[in-house]
Image (cartoon, rainbow, N blue to C red):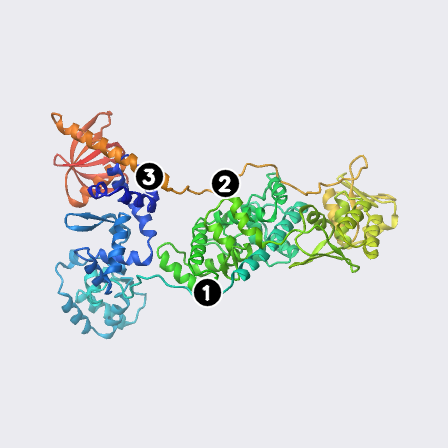
Amino acid sequence: MADDVRDRSDGDLHELLRRRQDLARPAPADLSALAARASTRASVQRAVDNLDLAHLQVLEAAMLVSTIDPESVAASLGVTSTATVRVLLQDLWTVALLWRGAEGLRLVRTVAEVLPQAAGLGPSAREQYGALSPPEELVALAQTAPPPARAILDRLTWGPPSAVLPMGAPDRVAEGARWLAEHQLVLTPSADRLVLPREVALALRGGRSHAQPALDPPRPSGTQRTAQDVDGAAGQQVTDLLSLVDDVATEWGLRPPRVLRSGGLAVRDLKRLASALDVDVVRAAFLAELTYAAGLLADDGSLDAAWAPTPAYDEWQKQPGDRRWAVLARSWLLTTRAPHLVGTTPPGGAGTINALGPQAHWPPARGLRRDVLDQLDQVPSWLAPEAGQLCEALRWRRPRRLPGNLDEVVAAVLRESEWLGVTGRGAISSAGRALLADQDEARLAAAMQPHLPEPVKHVLLQADLTAVAPGPLAGGLSTFMRLVADIESRGGATVYRFTTDSVRRGLDAGWSVDQVLGALEDASHTPVPQPLEYLVRDVARRHGQTRVGAMRAYVRCDDETTLGAMLAERELSPLQLRRIAATVLVSPVAAETVVEFLRENGFAPVAETPDGGVVIPSSAGHRTPLQRRSAPVTAHAVDDELVSTLVVALRAGEEAAAFQREERASRQGPSLPSTDPTTTLAVLREAAADRQAVWVGYSDADGQVRRLLFHPHRVEGGRVHGTAEGSPRTLSIHRVTGAAPD
């Protein structure tokens, strides 16, 4: 294989390194080291896992034929098109799962270790039974089998090749298994286990490797949309998304929920967030996870830790809508958080997975999300394929790298991409294609900008205590309206409703009655309606009549009747209020809790400082301390420039290695092998498989390196077992300085 790699052109090496990027990091010293690394089990496993179903079936068929050529492999697959098979074999050679020798194409030895049951076939029976009957005799014998035995053969023929007889199996099943064992049609590793040998399975299959060859990818179909419909729907979803993210920050800025001891967000806090946003729990979990992934939300790190917006949110909120979407979209594409797992039971665990918790971290999420979007990107433009057909396409594209709950994952990705505006009405949007193209933030924002409505700087105040925003509000006005009013409905126009609680929220934030009315008048094209002005002034008149301080807490009010009502209120009994003066009550509960209880029960207190001043909370609400947030862990792609540089370095390294080999060959006496560790391991594995001797350089306990002719038998567990000078020896691989064939 090393000779095959050396004989490849620069273009072939460039393609190999581009398609198997793990071979480029760290950079191998020369082409021999590259060939050795490409044949290691870990690298071959990664390469095989990246194959689609067509390449995988051709590779499995190539493992079953004596001569790997398009005609033999096509016959094994049972297909007539050798041209397609020839192209697939060439691809397998390009990625170094096959190599060319004097006899033609050969299989990389490690592939058999990665695919122990290739094409659903079991082990060979030659070691146990020796020579078996010809295939036609095996088929004739199977046809004479009794019905129970024949039923077992039918179940095992196309794989999986093994079966376990259940406890208390019917006598006829046991008799069928006994008949198969007596006629050497199955192997019996244990009393209750049957394994169909490879030779018998191939005979029953008629020499075919697969029942249904799938050399062509499936073509998803669906509903054809128009560009205007798709991008328009995506733009509307983004408008709603940005508004909801602002609502999350507003809600948790004022009332940050506690972080669970095990991490994450409590179920009741998630339900409270869903209720506040008027969305279901699934979407609320998605919004919380998305905001967290974008760095706009974090654990504040305090002793009594809480989830709250970060200072990055304040910077993000000032940006235009398209820029804000670009941050969210890129964060979603790169995150390994899986919002769809929230509320489910972890495998082998108890309880449920909490939003923002450690169990919602799922590394495969990023790759699967990208695979689903890539499939959407490959269908004809503006086509909305069905979820089931996308699953079929993914099973063909990644047959070895898919979870068992693929249908749920695909449904979740499609749902989240719709909420995020990456798709619109089931088809990928223009901005979604820009996201998949890994464009920079400016270009990504520019792809979404034409589909977002222009922000407006006014609202329409109405006499029924509502205000209508005819589009997304500009940043400052949006923050003010969220402060003094509650969102009643969303859509093309957002409806805000003014209530006693919402107006009091603005007064609590430090706004005076004149400032609130003045801001409403500036934002409206019409005068402030009289009912709204009465509401604001009435709330302001009663606002702050009751003062709450910390003694642990005291409540004072000039109106003795109000204090009497507090003492009589059953819902306030947890506060353990006690009158110490005609106008003063005290409580052993913290002042913040007293304020919250009183507000929930219809009173309108304000917090007060020890010197009697009013406590004015920050208008931005609670914020986490400024934290240094690490970027998502992603491996940088091996680009063409890096590959070209690496190919030049490999050629130079190979020339240097060849010069050193010639120099060693010209010296008197035996040379001491010295090779790259990956090359050393590959040489030892090859020698053990071929039962050949190798020269090794070995560092003994005294640190002396000596030359040793070694016959390796097996390599495992960091050691190589074999014989040297006629005696059994076990060498630690980390002490082997190099290996070279005898």
Question: CA–CA distance between discs 1 and 2?
Answer: 34 Å
Give the mark, 2 or 3, whose residue is nearer the N terminus: 2
Give the mark, 1 or 3, whose residue is nearer the N terminus: 1
Residue with the mark numbered 3? 644
Question: CA–CA distance between discs 1 and 3?
Answer: 41 Å
For label 1, the crowd category at 10 Å Cα-Cα, with few meaning under 14, some 14 to 19 and many 20 or more, is few
For label 2, the crowd category at 10 Å Cα-Cα, with few meaning under 14, some 14 to 19 and many 20 or more, is few
Residue at 32% from the left image edge and 37% from the top image edge: 646
Tags 1 and 3 touching, CB below 8 Å: no
Mark 1 or 3, closer to the camera: 3
Give the mark, 1 or 2, whose residue is nearer the N terminus: 1
Tags 1 and 2 touching, CB below 8 Å: no
| Numbered circle sitting on residue 636 | none
Quadrant hosting residue 149: bottom left
Q: Is residue 228 visible?
A: yes
| Numbered circle sitting on residue 631 | 2
Please provide percent x and percent y for residue 327: 55, 46
Mark 2 or 3, closer to the camera: 3
Q: 741 or 348, which is in the foreground?
A: 741
Please provide percent x and percent y for residue 384: 48, 63
Please provide percent x and percent y for residue 675: 23, 33
Q: Is residue 305 visible?
A: no
| Residue type highlighted by circle 1 | Glu
| Residue type highlighted by circle 2 | Ala
Residue at 17% from the left image edge and 64% from the top image edge: 184
Q: Name the secondary structure under disc 1.
A: loop
Question: CA–CA distance between discs 2 and 3?
Answer: 28 Å
| Residue type highlighted by circle 3 | Ser
Residue with the mark numbered 1? 386
